[in-house]
Image (cartoon, rainbow, N blue to C red):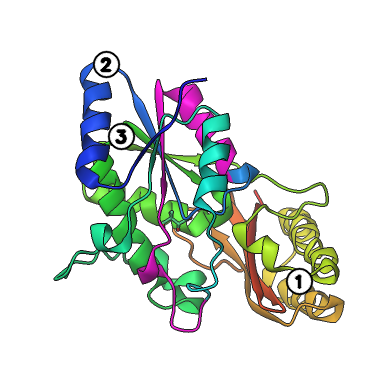
Amino acid sequence: MTRMIIVRRVADLRAHVSGWRGRGESVGLVPTMGALHDGHLSLVRRAKDDNVRAVATIFVNPTQFGPNEDLSAYPRDEAGDAAKLESVGCDLLFAPDVSEMYPAGFATSVSVAGITDHLDGIARPGHFGGVATIVAKLLLQALPDRAYFGEKDYQQLQVIKRLARDLDMPVEICGVPTVREADGLALSSRNRYLSAAERQIAGLLPRALAEAAQLLADGRAAAPLLTDIEGRLIAAGFGSVDYIALCDGMSLEPLAAARPGSRIFAAARIGRTRLIDNWPVL
Ligand code: PAF
């Protein structure tokens, strides 16, 4: 197994990636915030299947966390993450510190309108501005051929596709299917916050979404069905539901009934853990 290179400076990232691309070797980029699980590793495997080189980034981006969110508690384990990346053939890890990404005087932000008017754009004000800014920076720093993002964060994936198109970035944005536990729970770095009892309850979320998706596909109206599901989640032990909505899969606009390309989206809290998930409808 070739040893994975670890760099912390943008200049070193660029030197390696441009060297590879100059030799005709394609490069796939996998941006992450660390605390890696099999979902992340599936992105790296896909990057490695599609390209000669795979580059992962680990940066817990402060600008995408709200004031009452879990920035300081966000799990960090660079040594463990590096071992996992190396085990799936990642060629290079870029792990900058905050001052490398946001040097003194940093004053620019990227915002994507429209898609961010819904779902987490409302529930987490400012979140997508932070995501769009850091992902735009990572894409411009690395200049890869392709970049990979999980469909669990489906709205984020649409935001990133939009920004890459709108800013004429010469990169293909690739969505990768969600990896799930045996009971359907989507893998997430935040699942480690769940107690054993909460973990049992959490499996209800994907099951409820799958069931609702089937009923919506059969022609049921969205509003009463989604209200019913919200009630079931609360009755089962979820503390609150930020949203559960049927939306167009591209624009993220809410829909009253299913149509081709629609998806159901949910964000719900158990204890201190916020879970998000989504499911295709038609
Ligand atoms: O999905 C994530 O882990 C983050 O939002 C991302 C895309 C790495 C940007 O910080």
Residue 114 is at least partly visible in this image: no
Identify the residue position indicated by label 1 in the image: 225
Residue 24: mark in rendering: 2
Badge 3 element? loop
Q: Is residue 89 above or below residue 85?
A: above
Name the residue furthest top: 23
Please give left or right for residue 123 compared with residue 218 in the image.
left
Please tell me in which quadrant of the rendered image residue 204 appears: bottom right
In the rendered structure, are the residues bearing label 1 and label 3 in contact, judged by CB atoms less than 8 Å apart? no
Foreground residue among 62 and 269: 62
Residue 65 lies, in percent from the top left, at 44, 73
Between marks 2 and 1 in the image, the one whose residue lies nearer the viewer? 2
Quarter of the rendered image showing ligand 1: bottom left
Identify the residue position indicated by label 3 in the image: 144
Is 48 contained in the magenta span? yes
- First in residue order: circle 3 vs circle 2: 2
Task: Give the residues in magenta.
Answer: 40-69
Residue 116 lies, in percent from the top left, at 40, 67
Foreground residue among 87 and 216: 87
Badge 2 element? loop
Classify mark 2: residues with Cα within 10 Å, few (<14), some (14-19) or many (20+): few
Residue 202 is at least partly visible in this image: yes
Measure the C-alpha gap from mark 3 to mark 2: 12 Å
Residue shown at the point (48%, 26%) measured from the top left: 48
Classify mark 1: residues with Cα within 10 Å, few (<14), some (14-19) or many (20+): some
